[in-house]
Image (spheres, rainbow, N blue to C red):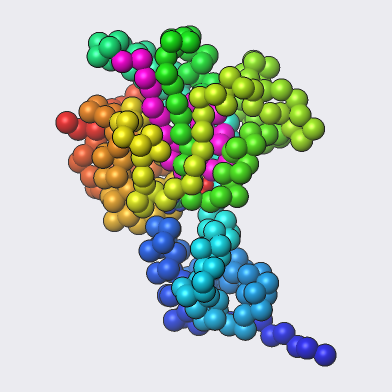
Amino acid sequence: MLFYTKPVMSAEEFRLFQEFVADLFGIVIDEGRENYLVQKLLPRLEALRHGSFAEYYAHLKYAPNREEEHQRLISLITNNETYLFREESQLDIFAKVTLPALKEKCLQTGSRKIRIISAGCSSGEEGYTLAMILLESGLFLWDWDIAISGVDIDSQVLAKAELGVYSGRAFQTTPPHYIDRYFTKSSDGMQVRESLRRITRFSRGNLLNLENPFENETVDIIFCRNVLIYFSEETIGRIVAGFGRLLKRDGLLFLGHSESLARITTQFIPERHPGAIIYKKRD
Ligand SMILES: C[S@@+](CC[C@H](N)C(=O)[O-])C[C@H]1O[C@@H](n2cnc3c(N)ncnc32)[C@H](O)[C@@H]1O
C-alpha cells in the first residue's frame, strides 16, 4: 500500500512562491497566508505527483511545458468575482456624464470611433455591461465605430467571457429591461445577443506589460476595477503608467470604489462625482 504524507510548506518555499507570483502576475500574497497557499496548491502537487512544494516550484520554473502550469496556477490564485452592472453609481456617471462628454469631444475632432478596455475583465460581465450602457444611451448610432476589449490573464474566465452565458448572481443588480433587450434564453442560462457581441471582444494579457488590444489606436477609457487591490503599490504604479501610454490625451481611468491612485502617481487627475471618482490622464 502506498502512503501519501501531505507535504508541508517551509518558510523558504512560501517566500519563493510569493516572489514567483508577484514577478509573473503582480499579485501579492500577504505574509501569514501559508495555509491559504497550501490549500490552493496541494491539488496541483497531487495531480503532478510532486512530493514537495520545492518540486512543484521547480516545475513552474523549468518544466518545458511550464506555461500550461502557469495558467493553472493563475486560475487557482486569482479572485474572479464579478457581475453585471457592478458599482451602479459609477456606471450612472459613466452613462450620464462620461458618454455625452466623450461624444462631444469626438464630434469636435471629427472622429466617430470609441475604444474602451476592460482590464481584468474576468468572465466578461464588465465588458458586456459597458456595451449595454453604450447601446442604451442612444448617443452612438450605426455610423459609430465602437469596440470594447476585455483583457484578463486567466484563460479559464476568458473562455466564459467568449461564451457570454450567465445566470443567477451574475444578474443580481441588472435592471430587468436590460435582460429582456440584450439576452436570449439558452440551455445553461441567458446568452448575450449579437448586438453586444458585435462591439465586444476578449483576449489574454498581463496588466504588468499590457499590449494595446487595439494595436496602434489610442484608447478613450480604461476600466480597471477590483483588480489593483491585489497588487503592491509599486506594481500599481507600473500598471497605471502602462495605462497612461495607451490612453488618449484626456483619456479616463475608472477604478473600483476601494481603489485609489493617491500616493501612487500624479499622472492622473481625480475628478470627483457623487458616488464615483474618475481619473483623467494629465496632459
Ligand atoms: C475580481 S476580478 C474583477 C473583475 C471586474 N473588473 C469587476 O470589477 O467585476 C479580477 C480579475 O483580474 C484578473 N487579473 C489578476 N491579475 C492580473 C494580471 N496581472 N493581468 C491581467 N488580469 C489579471 C483576474 O484573473 C480576475 O479575473
Q: Is residue 229 visible?
A: no
Q: Where the N terminus falls, by quadrant?
A: bottom right
Q: Where the C terminus falls, by quadrant?
A: top left
Residue 272 percent coordinates (x, y):
31, 27
* Relative horizontal placement of residue 20, taking residue 129 as reference (left or right): left
Q: Which residues are magenta?
A: 111-130
Q: Nearer the viewer, residue 188 or 40?
A: 188
Residue 265 percent coordinates (x, y):
23, 45
Q: Residue 187: which quarter of the image?
A: top right
Q: Residue 277: which quarter of the image?
A: top left
Q: Nearer the viewer, residue 268 or 35?
A: 268
Name the residue located 49 percent from the left edge and 42 percent from the top edge: 203
Name the residue located 51 percent from the left edge and 29 percent from the top edge: 200
Name the residue located 19 percent from the left edge and 32 percent from the top edge: 282
As drawn, 103 above or below 80 = above
Residue 248 percent coordinates (x, y):
26, 29
In magenta segment, residue 24: no
As drawn, 276 above or below 141 = below
Total tally of numbered discs in the picture? 0
As drawn, 31 above or below 230 = below
| Farthest-out residue, right | 1
In magenta segment, residue 115: yes
Q: Nearer the viewer, residue 9 or 51?
A: 51
Residue 108 percent coordinates (x, y):
25, 11
| Farthest-out residue, bottom | 1
Name the residue located 39 percent from the left edge and 48 percent from the top edge: 207
Q: Is residue 43 visible?
A: yes
Q: Nearer the viewer, residue 76 or 265?
A: 76
| Farthest-out residue, left | 283
* Relative horizontal placement of residue 63, taking residue 16 as reference (left or right): right
As drawn, 282 above or below 103 = below
